Image: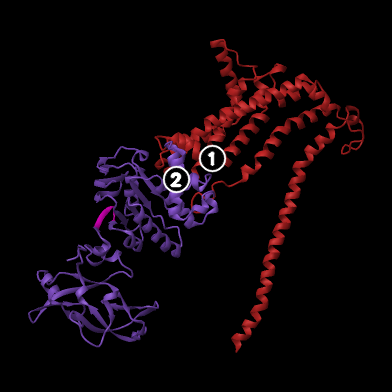
Chain colours: A purple, B red
Amino acid sequence: MADVTLRKVVKRYDDVEAVRGIDLDIADKEFVVLVGPSGCGKSTTLRMIAGLEDITDGDIMIGGDVVNDVPPKDRDIAMVFQNYALYPHMTVAENMSFGLRLKHYPKAEIKSRVTEAARMLDITDLIDRKPKQLSGGQRQRVAMGRAIVRNPKVFLFDEPLSNLDAKLRVQMRIEIKKVHQKVRTTTVYVTHDQVEAMTLADRVVVMNHGRIEQIGTPNELYHKPATRFVAGFIGSPAMNFIPCRLEDAAGKLQIRLTDRISFPLPPERAARYQNVPRNEKLLLGLRPEHITEASAHAEPGVENFEVVLDVIEPMGMETLIYFILEGVEVCGRASPNAGAQAGAPFRLAVDLNNMHLLNEATGAVI
Amino acid sequence: MASTIVIDKAAPTRSVKYGSMSRDRAWALRWSYFFLTLFAIFSLVPPLYMLITSLKSSAEISAATNPWWVFHPTLSNYIQLLSSNQFLRFFWNSAMVSIVVVTITMLISVPAAFALARMRFWGSATLATGVFLTYLIPDTLLFIPLFKMFAVFGDWTGIQLINRWYVLLLIYPTLTVPFCTWTMIGYFASIPKELDEAAIIDGASWFQTLTRIFIPVALPGLIAATIFAFTVSWAQFLYPLVFTTSTDQLVLPVGIITTLIKGDVFNWGQIMTGALLGAAPPLIIYAFLMDYYIAGLTAGATKG
């Protein structure tokens, strides 16, 4: 039972500011993922919550108590590291029980907790092995077991799946989600993989350059990104950004991409963007799934136009199509049966009901 | 059509290339064994000669027979040395000095290395380099000032340390501690940082992290350092030669040459026997600890 609160937390190394004033409220039992490119300060933030790094400024609270100067062992947290950090000279059981043994728990209690955690993680058969006899996925389970056994207030995960191969990563991701559903403990999880962030999190915190760009549920971040960074970071393939401007044509607002291509905006969008200055440099943000092959019957807000395709990537269930628009490479997703061919003209449909409009200078989503 | 002909030709060439690769390996092995044999001969011939000589009587040694063969083997040299109280005293002194020095060295250098490798404090990097530089000063340069120090200390306090075997307990660590600390720093530094962070989060104190994680994980390094400290103290010659003179205070290496060389008479049989017996303890220790020494215990700690 613990919520975690960060108030204006700053971390400075000599002259480098790794974390520049973070405010974050993590509710009890919530699964929060910190995501961002390397060097964005997400790991540093996690390590400050763990107490492995001193904080330069601000406050960190766990369960309502300020823990700025509380050593890690008294914060009642457990951490899973990227490289597992298992004690190589101890068996799986000894690894898992190390923390409890240090705190002089009764033997029977230790045994029952280890057995229970091992059962939950499906590593009962491995309990007497040494870490070097385990595979990567098994080691990761043991590392999680070591955290679960402690029954801490907060779980901290520092890129726990980065060392696993792609297939195992998906499997362990599901495993982590299952564990969190069984052991409802406040969890802070750091990753640079936006898919991991989206699939695991109750709420995702997107960080960049030591600051929080946006906090929200996976769906909020995907459908309502606040900045160009979030829009481009969340989702794969990434959102397209096409230079554009707004103009009035016969009393209606329309968006002009090139001299040749312009689209009338759907009424709901036109109302929202009415006050944007007409000469402002803007970016049209469109996710690849909203650029598809044109269909026979027109739908409101969906506009058709023709391009010459540059590259196509057949993925099986879909074909990724690439073309150049205003000097920008644009990616779309077409049906494999649409007959897309590299170097050939292709008739596209863009769904403007799902468009985003960004200010090119500030990167803010309008 | 032309291209298919090329492919046909390529096939046999490739199989020949596989053969040449293993031929490379065979040559590499041949050279390795050649040099290994060379070095084995180089290092094993002297002990062999010692063994042969130790089994001869003085008469046979001075006789002009084949020096590489024993015609009348005798254990008299061994019997004489092992029944001589004086020789056993040297042995005892050496054993005491070595064991205590190893203990002192480990008690100092393991915590020191842990502190220097892991606890970042002001000047820790400079201190670590300083430890190493200390080791670089040769003992031939140090023994005169050290002797003077103990002499002055004796004059001031009345506590006489010169010509006592236990003075070596104070002197040897000046050789062993810097080196052992330095090697242990290297071993501790190779332990992934996450391992002690995990221990700290698990609730371990610095001391518990050292004793329950670092020492077991760095055991091969610890054993290497122990062997080093033991060898240095066991084989040290210059310091005991300078600091101890009475026969009951001597350690083995000095004892052998001061008591078995009488003027210009070299008792070769006993000298060789004494040297062989003196070389035995380090050999036995090496043999026992070799497995630990080689074993890579850190395998599996993190992603291997």
Q: Which mark is residue B46?
A: none
At horizontal 56% and vertical 18% (from top left) the residue drawn is: B149
Residue B24 falls left or right of residue A86? right
Q: Position of residue B65 (x, y in %)?
A: 92, 35
Give the chain of mark 1: B
Alpha carbons under labels 2 and 1: distance apart: 27 Å
Closer-to-camera residue (A107/B280): A107
Q: Which mark is residue B216?
A: 1
Closer-to-camera residue (B186/B35): B186
Closer-to-camera residue (A251/B156): A251
Indicate the quadrant where residue B63 lies: top right
Q: Which residues are magenta?
A: A208-214
Please tell me whether residue A24 is drawn above or below residue B97 in the rendered image: below
At horizontal 60% and vertical 35% (from top left) the residue drawn is: B226
Mark 2: amino acid: Ser
Answer few, some or many: residues within 10 Å of disc 2's Cα (few below 14, many 20 plus, some between 14 and 19). Answer: few
Indicate the quadrant where residue A198 lies: bottom left
Closer-to-camera residue (A42/B44): A42
Q: Position of residue B45 (x, y in %)?
A: 79, 41
At horizontal 58% and vertical 47% (from top left) the residue drawn is: B296
In the rendered image, the quadrant that contains the N terminus of chain B is bottom right
Please tell me whether residue B5 is drawn above or below residue A4 in the rendered image: below
